């Protein structure tokens, strides 16, 4: 939509000059009204909307300084441009202090670059509004389809309309958040129409190329998407790009397209931004509730190896593209059948569900299930634990009081650090730190039950020198604070 302009000037000659000597349409503006002083301007704004007010400084009833102050209090989103002659420039300086974006000298109205100056001022003003937390919340509410927000919708319309089209892109980090310096920035694209950034997500509106050919616009979109993929090269993410939008009325539809394209990315074997135009047919034909019968898992395992069966199941999940819950049920059903086939039906699966829930892509879920399958073979005695892993566990149990590290333990067992870390996780299902912490917390529980040592003394005796960290991991591994655990121990000792 065009930015609406209100002219406030008591001299009809200068009102005419402002209206006629600037090419408003060229820069996306339109004159919607005129007022002869500040009070008349405020009365106008009670009935009509405007995004820009160009106001003279010296006027009767209410001058430009008073109007600027009133506008900032009542209509903070409006951009104010001070209009002044040389002899009242002190008013201009005061107006700028109060929040006017820029000023125009009346003597310069006939210059060709005045319209461009106003447009540049508007772009600065728009970027300032983009940092407003209330507008951010409103836009997020709209984009996530959680409700309406008038201010957020107004701002998006200002950003998106009067364009040659635009694309909505949505990104989600698969880790704890964005890590690279470029991705920590609020803006990933210099000419984006709007970007919204938080710790794990990023929303971006990308302008379509100013071209009449949709093919040329699509080629430019793909080129710019590749540039974004290079920016995200060191990140683990999924991302989706909507089809081309023409106006803000399709925001919810475009948001859903970007979300669905992003979901399709969870089934991609390659890290890339998924474009809705390319994945739409496959996504809309997905079998979201696909679930194999448990009997088919048992039959599959009898026909092929458990590892091959897992690969076949994953291939089918890639083909069917089911929802998150169905994927996890399929994998858990398969591993249950594999455990029964190996004669270890009592294998604990609670950790599996948690790991699957955290995995962001089908590829990652498959890797997790493969690790669980490897551990089943170890438990069933069909695959021995690596001797280096057995040696490391024995060493940690004997030396948990010491300051142990992955590199130090790898050196003790004579293995490359990276290789050792991988096989330890594969054989035990835990990292070195997790396994060591479990040993230390078990010893701490024994000390709490058998002694009256203080918390920091127990921490030191199990190799943890930071008492605050000790309290944190104690609760993580036991589900209780140290005090709650002590009280429970006391209650067990009390006679009936």
Image (cartoon, grey):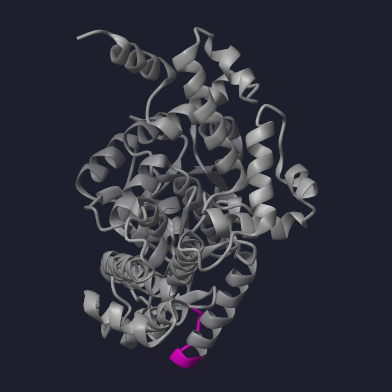
The residue located at (39%, 75%) in the rendering is 264
Q: Is residue 97 visible?
A: yes
**Residue 24, placed above or below residue 73:** below
In the picture, which quadrant includes the C terminus? top left
Looking at the image, which is closer to me, 492 or 46? 492
In the picture, which quadrant includes the N terminus? bottom left
Looking at the image, which is closer to me, 447 or 129? 447
Image coordinates for residue 393, horizontal then vertical, percent: 63, 44
Looking at the image, which is closer to me, 202 or 87? 202
Looking at the image, which is closer to me, 464 or 241? 464
Image coordinates for residue 323, horizontal then vertical, percent: 28, 70
Main secondary structure type of the part rendered in magenta = loop
Q: Residue 436: within the magenta? A: no
Image coordinates for residue 490, horizontal then vertical, percent: 34, 11
The residue located at (23%, 74%) in the rendering is 294
Image coordinates for residue 67, horizontal then vertical, percent: 38, 33
The residue located at (71%, 60%) in the rendering is 419
Q: Is residue 21 visible?
A: no
Q: Which residues are magenta?
A: 208-215
**Residue 296, placed above or below residue 427:** below
Q: Quadrant of residue 116?
A: bottom right
In the image, taking residue 174 as reference, residue 322 lies left or right, namely: left
**Residue 294, placed above or below residue 117:** below
**Residue 256, placed above or below residue 293:** above
Q: How many marks?
A: 0
In the image, taking residue 69 as reference, residue 289 lies left or right, namely: left
The residue located at (33%, 42%) in the rendering is 36
């Amino acid at each position: 939509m065009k930015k609406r302009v209100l002219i406030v000037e008591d001299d009809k000659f200068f009102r005419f000059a402002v209206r006629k000597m600037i090419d408003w349409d060229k820069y996306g503006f339109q004159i919607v009204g005129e007022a002869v002083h500040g009070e008349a301007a405020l009365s106008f704004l009670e009935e009509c909307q405007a995004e820009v007010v160009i106001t003279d400084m010296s006027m009767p009833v209410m001058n430009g300084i008073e109007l600027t102050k009133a506008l900032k209090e009542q209509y903070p989103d409006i951009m104010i441009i001070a209009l002044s002659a040389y002899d009242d420039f002190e008013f201009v300086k005061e107006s700028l202090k109060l929040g006017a974006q820029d000023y125009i000298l009346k003597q310069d109205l006939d210059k060709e670059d005045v319209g461009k100056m106003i447009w540049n001022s508007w772009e600065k003003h728009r970027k300032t509004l983009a940092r407003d937390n209330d507008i951010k919340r409103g836009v997020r509410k709209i984009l996530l389809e959680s409700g309406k927000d008038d201010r957020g919708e107004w701002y998006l319309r200002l950003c998106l309309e009067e364009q040659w089209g635009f694309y909505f892109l949505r990104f989600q980090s698969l880790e704890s958040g964005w890590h690279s310096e470029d991705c920590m920035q609020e803006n990933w694209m210099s000419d984006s129409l709007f970007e919204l950034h938080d710790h794990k997500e990023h929303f971006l509106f990308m302008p379509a190329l100013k071209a009449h050919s949709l093919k040329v616009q699509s080629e430019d979109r793909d080129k710019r998407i590749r540039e974004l993929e290079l920016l995200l090269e060191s990140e683990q993410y999924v991302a989706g790009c909507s089809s081309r939008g023409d106006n803000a009325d399709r925001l919810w539809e475009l948001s859903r397209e970007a979300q669905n394209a992003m979901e399709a990315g969870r089934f991609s074997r390659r890290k890339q931004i998924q474009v809705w135009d390319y994945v739409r047919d496959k996504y809309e034909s997905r079998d979201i509730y696909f679930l194999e019968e448990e009997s088919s898992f048992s039959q599959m395992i009898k026909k092929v190896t458990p590892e091959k069966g897992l690969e076949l199941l994953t291939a089918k999940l890639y083909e069917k593209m089911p929802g998150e819950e169905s994927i996890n049920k399929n994998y858990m059903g398969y591993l249950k059948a594999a455990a029964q086939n190996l004669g270890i039906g009592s294998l604990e699966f609670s950790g599996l569900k948690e790991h699957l829930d955290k995995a962001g892509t089908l590829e990652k879920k498959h890797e997790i299930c493969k690790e669980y399958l490897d551990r089943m073979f170890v438990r069933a005695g069909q695959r021995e634990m690596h001797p280096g892993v057995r040696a490391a566990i024995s060493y940690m149990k004997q030396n948990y009081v010491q300051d142990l590290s992955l590199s130090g333990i790898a050196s003790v067992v004579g293995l490359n650090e990276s290789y050792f870390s991988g096989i330890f996780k594969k054989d035990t299902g835990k990292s070195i730190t997790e396994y060591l912490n479990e040993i230390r917390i078990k010893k701490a529980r024994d000390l709490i039950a058998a002694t009256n040592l203080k918390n920091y003394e127990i921490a030191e005796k199990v190799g943890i020198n930071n008492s605050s960290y000790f309290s944190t991991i104690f609760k993580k591994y036991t589900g209780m604070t140290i005090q709650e655990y002590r009280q429970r121990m006391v209650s067990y000792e009390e006679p009936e």
